[in-house]
Amino acid sequence: MLSEKELEIYRRVGRIAAEVREEVRRMVKPGELLLNIAETAEELIRSKGAQPAFPCNVSVNAVAAHYSPPADDKSRIQEGDVVKVDIGAHIDGYIADTAFTVAVGGKNQEIAEAVEQVLEKAIGMVKPGVNVGEIGATIEEAAKVAGFRPIENLTGHELARWDLHAGITIPNVKEESEQTVKEGDVLALEPFITNGAGEVEDQPETYIFRFIGVRPVQRRMSLKVLQDISRLYRSLPFAERWLAKRMSRIRLQLTLRDLINAGAIRPYHVLKEREDGLVAQAEHTLIVTKDGCEVTTR
């Protein structure tokens, strides 16, 4: 169970994430740089007294997740794009995770509205004792009723201090599971829906990484960077561009490759819908209560 102090921190960081989400939502319009959206979100989090829990994701159309613009990204939002923005904040390791979708220009408004409805139905299922497979079944049914497919190999997740993917996972499809929700759990529900195949695949690109542990590395610079990563981000994901100001791009790429090969950091590949279908995402963080749940990111 969470202490009163922990509850208050979760509520505070949830409010911050929600405020940032709504401020950034207004930026999602034609001509805006993806990089500007991500960096503005991260700076707003810092300005409000928290830190990014992971790099802001700005994923467009068939790209579902793990696209955090690199430092030299010149990509801009276009009319008709379906844009997902995934924001995480933490205070002393206590995390809030929230996401939204904008159908730019309204062309694909149906999928953006549908994923919000799916999320609300999922939230309505959460209470102590409920099996996570039941939540997944609700997400799947709601998505199909709206005319879309859930993405079956993406899930919601439990949050813990300094741990973005802790404990139980919440499927986006009906699934046999022995995992149940209990009072005091902190969950991030995040349905993804698509008009494509309902599955994402890894792409070659990686812009987000996570510290795994100190390992023997080939270069002295790599060890120094690894020590800084451990100190600054601990077990939470970080962006390549967060390191870009301290060294040249070539040296940064060599350092990251060295750390990956040593097993010291884990790369997160950009995820794209298998049939290039449009993808929409919505997400809230919630605390499971005695009779239901409290959404911290409203």
Image: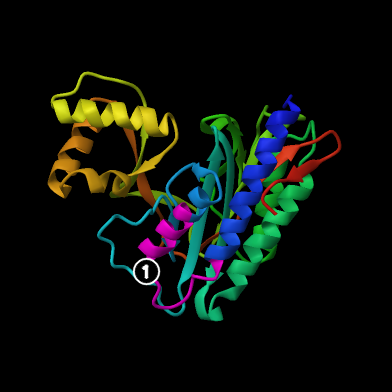
Q: Is residue 223 left or right of residue 19?
A: left
Query: At 65% from the left edge and 59% from the top edge, which residue is drawn?
Result: 143
* Residue 261 sits in quarter: top left
Looking at the image, residue 187 lies above or below residue 278? above
Could you tell me how many numbered marks the image carries?
1
Q: Nearer the viewer, residue 185 or 127?
A: 185
The amino acid type found where label 1 is placed reads Leu
Q: Is residue 293 left or right of residue 262?
A: right
Q: Is residue 282 left or right of residue 42?
A: right
Looking at the image, residue 44 lies above or below residue 253? below
Is 32 contained in the magenta span? yes
Query: At 28% from the left edge and 67% from the top edge, which residue is drawn?
Result: 74
x and y, in percent, of residue 19 in the image = 61, 57
Say what secondary structure mark 1 lies in: loop
x and y, in percent, of residue 12 in the image = 66, 43
Q: Nearer the viewer, residue 222 or 118?
A: 222
Query: At 73% from the left edge and 26% from the top edge, which residue is drawn?
Result: 3
Residue at numbered disc 1: 33
Name the quarter where the C terminus is drawn: bottom right
Looking at the image, residue 122 lies above or below residue 75? above
Q: Nearer the viewer, residue 234 or 193?
A: 234
The range drawn in magenta is 25-43
Name the quarter where the N terminus is drawn: top right
Task: Answer yes or no: is residue 109 visible.
Answer: yes
x and y, in percent, of residue 260 in the image = 25, 32
Pointer 1 local density, CA inside 10 Å: few below 14, some 14–19, many at least 20: some
x and y, in percent, of residue 108 in the image = 54, 75
